[in-house]
Each structure stands twice: as C-alpha cells, then as structure tokens.
Image (cartoon, rainbow, N blue to C red):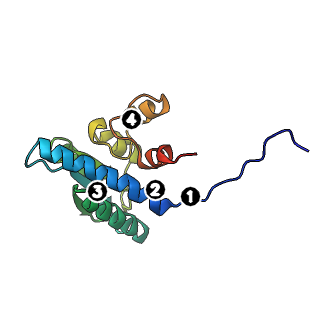
Amino acid sequence: MSDLPSVRGQPLSGTAVSAEIRANLKERVEKLQALVPGYAPGLTIVQVGDREDSNVYIRGKLKAAEEVGIVAQLVKLPNTTSEGTLLALLRKLNNDPKVHGIIVQMPLDSQLPIDSHLITDSVSPAKDVDGLNTINEGQNLCLSKPIFKPIPNYAISKINV
C-alpha cells in the first residue's frame, strides 16, 4: 500500500471554462469601451496558404473575437508568399494603431522558404497574441508579466485544480 492519499480527479468541461473566459473578456472589453468611446480592440490574423486545419482553427478564433467584441480580420496570403512580403506586412501591422494584437497562423504554408522564427520575432512583443516572439517567450518562461498571455497558458491558469 502507498502512503500517498487517494485523490480523485474531477471532470473538466472545456466548454464551461471557455464560456467563463469569454464572458470575462467581453465584460472587460465593454468596460474599456465605456471609458474610451469609439475604441475597438483590433486583432489581425495572418495566414499563409490554405491548410484546412488552419482554416478551422482560424474560424474559431474569429468567432471567439466577435463574441467578446474584438474587431478581427484575416489577412490570407497565397502559398507563393515570400518571406520579404510577409515581413513587410508585419511591419505595417506593427505600426497600425488600430491593430492591437497579431497572430501569425502556424505552420506557414508557403512554397517558398520562410524562416518561421524570424517571422514570429518580427511581430511586435506588444502585439504578439500567441507569445511566440523570443522576448515574450522569455517573459513567460521567467514567470514575469507578458503583455499577452498565450492562450493555452492562460486557459490552464484559469482551471481550479
């Protein structure tokens, strides 16, 4: 016999946790909009290529953003997009005051070579929703306060164990 206490797991409803997080985010967006009339948080998702698994994931992100009051747009680039073209787009988005968050959908589905690490590091840390920029990865690793909490990490932190 083990000296460890018997612990029973509890079923977890991902749907319920997700609904709670979205309701909280919607409330926070509404409060912010009440303080700053006309403010609309903006999210841009950048997709290279047309992978069906990415399309499904992106549809979910767009729906979630709409539910909480975030203005989300998808910039879909062809699978012939070059690294230079993608970097130029990211520079434009980084400098756009209406874009508050950027997601570059991975994997990049380009026929041309693109350095995905260079791409994720080209997203401003202040707009890096997925937390893949090296600066944000370091902040997450060191348990300091990242600007954006990566979604999986945030969801796990909200689960009461």
Please name the residue shown 49% across and 43% down the image: 157
N-terminal label among 2 and 1:
1
User: Disc 3 to disc 1, how far (Cα)?
Assistant: 32 Å
Whether residue 27 is visible here, answered yes or no, is yes
Say which amino acid is labelled 4: Asn
Determine whether 94 is above or below 11 in the image: above
Task: Find disc 3 in the rendering and name its residue.
Answer: 46
Give whichever of discs 2 and 3 has the lower sequence position: 2
Under tag 2, what secondary structure?
helix
Query: Is 123 above or below relative to 60?
Result: above
Circle 2/circle 1 CB separation < 8 Å: yes
Question: What label does residue 17 carry, if any?
Answer: 2
Front residue of 99 and 77: 99
Closer to the camera in the image, 74 or 64: 64
Q: CB of mark 4 within 8 Å of CB of mark 2?
A: no
Q: Is 118 left, or right, of 138 in this rendering?
A: left
Q: Does label 4 or label 1 sit earlier along the sequence?
A: 1
Q: Which residue is mark 4?
A: 136
Q: Secondary structure at mark 4?
A: helix
Name the mark nearer the viewer: 2 or 3.
2
Report how far apart the C-alphas of labels 4 and 3 lie in the structure: 19 Å
Q: How crowded is the residue under tag 1: few (<14 C-alpha within 10 Å), some, or many (20+)?
A: few
Q: Nearer the viewer, residue 9 or 64?
A: 9
Q: What secondary structure is marked by label 1?
A: loop
Please report whichever mark, 4 or 3, sits nearer to the chain's N-terminal start: 3
Q: Is residue 97 visible?
A: no
